[in-house]
Image (cartoon, rainbow, N blue to C red):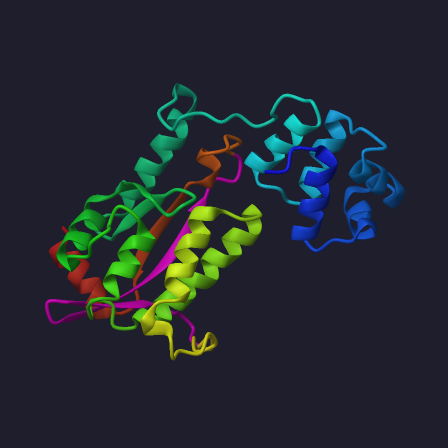
């Protein structure tokens, strides 16, 4: 891992595909100053590190790393999820999931590990019989071994595109990169064009086969916009919604 501030700045500028001039315009400083910071001829102030991190849209963890490299204390807290200070966040997640019953809802972390799930999600995953339900990507990969997801290829390609976007945002992540490689190199995608997803559809759903019943679900994703904690800010609440009347009826009758 790069430890010198100038190297970190250059690395993130490259990740975001900014020239020194583009970064200077985003951060409202001179391109000459950007050059001096990268070469080590100038040292940034704390305020400058924050300004550059914002201009480069660094994730909070990376911004903390940049602060440390520049000789300053981290700006964003990094607490365990059971910390008292994060009680409002945990309560909000619980409330959102509970209110979404009888439809499935889960909360996942940066690596798609399930950290909470409502009653409907637990029952639905159990009914599907998919292994690896502790992680959404493990579950997706395991589902490829059966016909439980009718449009597995389409679902996998959409998940892969989303994961790759997350990797770019994070500036790289070994766990996500490993999952992305597993999905991209899966035999079921070997002969599938990466552009095979029909983006002309109004809604792209995952279609599940459950004991002869065809259930169609699409997902909305919520994140906390004002949470400053490194770990908690990565939490995403994924709420599943029925895409047709048959699916609506199933969850109204089976999950209530």
Examine the rendered structure and indicate whether residue 19 appears above or below residue 60.
below
Residue 248 within the magenta-colored segment of the rendering: no
Examine the rendered structure and indicate whether residue 242 appears above or below residue 19.
below
Percent coordinates x, y for residue 54 in the rendering: 68, 40
Q: In the rendered view, does 53 fall on the left or right side of 200?
A: right
Q: Which residues are magenta?
A: 201-226
Residue at 15% across, 57% down: 129
Q: In the rendered view, does 155 fall on the left or right side of 9?
A: left
Decide whether the magenta segment is chiefly helix, strand or loop: strand
The residue closer to the viewer here, 208 or 254, is 208
Residue at 84% across, 31% down: 42
Q: In the rendered view, does 36 fall on the left or right side of 243?
A: right
Percent coordinates x, y for residue 237 in the rendering: 38, 46
Residue at 46% across, 40% down: 234
The residue closer to the viewer here, 17 or 199, is 17
Residue at 36% across, 44% down: 108
Examine the rendered structure and indicate whether residue 18 appears above or below residue 143.
above
The residue closer to the viewer here, 241 or 23, is 23
Examine the rendered structure and indicate whether residue 212 appears above or below residue 113.
below
Percent coordinates x, y for residue 220 in the rendering: 39, 55
Q: In the rendered view, does 88 fall on the left or right side of 12?
A: left
Percent coordinates x, y for residue 174 in the rendering: 47, 47
Residue 202 within the magenta-colored segment of the rendering: yes
């Amino acid at each position: 891992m790069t430890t010198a501030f100038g190297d970190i700045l250059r690395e993130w500028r490259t990740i975001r595909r900014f020239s020194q001039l583009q970064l200077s315009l985003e951060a409202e400083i001179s391109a000459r100053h950007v050059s001096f910071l990268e070469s080590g001829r100038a040292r940034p102030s704390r305020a400058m590190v924050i300004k550059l991190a914002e201009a480069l849209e660094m994730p909070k963890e990376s911004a903390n790393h940049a602060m440390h490299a520049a000789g300053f204390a981290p700006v964003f807290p990094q607490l365990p999820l059971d910390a008292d200070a994060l009680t409002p966040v945990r309560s909000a997640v619980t409330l959102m999931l509970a209110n979404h019953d009888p439809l499935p809802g889960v909360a996942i972390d940066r690596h798609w590990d399930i950290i909470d799930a409502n009653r409907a999600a637990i029952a639905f995953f159990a009914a599907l019989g998919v292994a690896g339900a502790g992680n959404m990507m493990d579950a997706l990969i395991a589902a490829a071994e059966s016909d439980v997801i009718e449009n597995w290829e389409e679902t996998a390609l959409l998940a892969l595109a989303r994961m790759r976007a997350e990797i770019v945002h994070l500036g790289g992540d070994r766990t996500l990169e490993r999952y992305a490689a597993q999905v991209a190199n899966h035999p079921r995608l070997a002969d599938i064009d990466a552009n095979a997803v029909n983006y002309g559809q109004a809604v792209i759903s995952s279609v599940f086969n459950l004991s002869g019943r065809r259930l169609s679900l699409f997902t909305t994703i919520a994140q906390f916009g004002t949470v400053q904690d490194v770990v908690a800010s990565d939490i995403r609440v994924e709420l599943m919604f029925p895409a047709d009347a048959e699916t609506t009826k199933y969850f109204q009758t089976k999950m209530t």
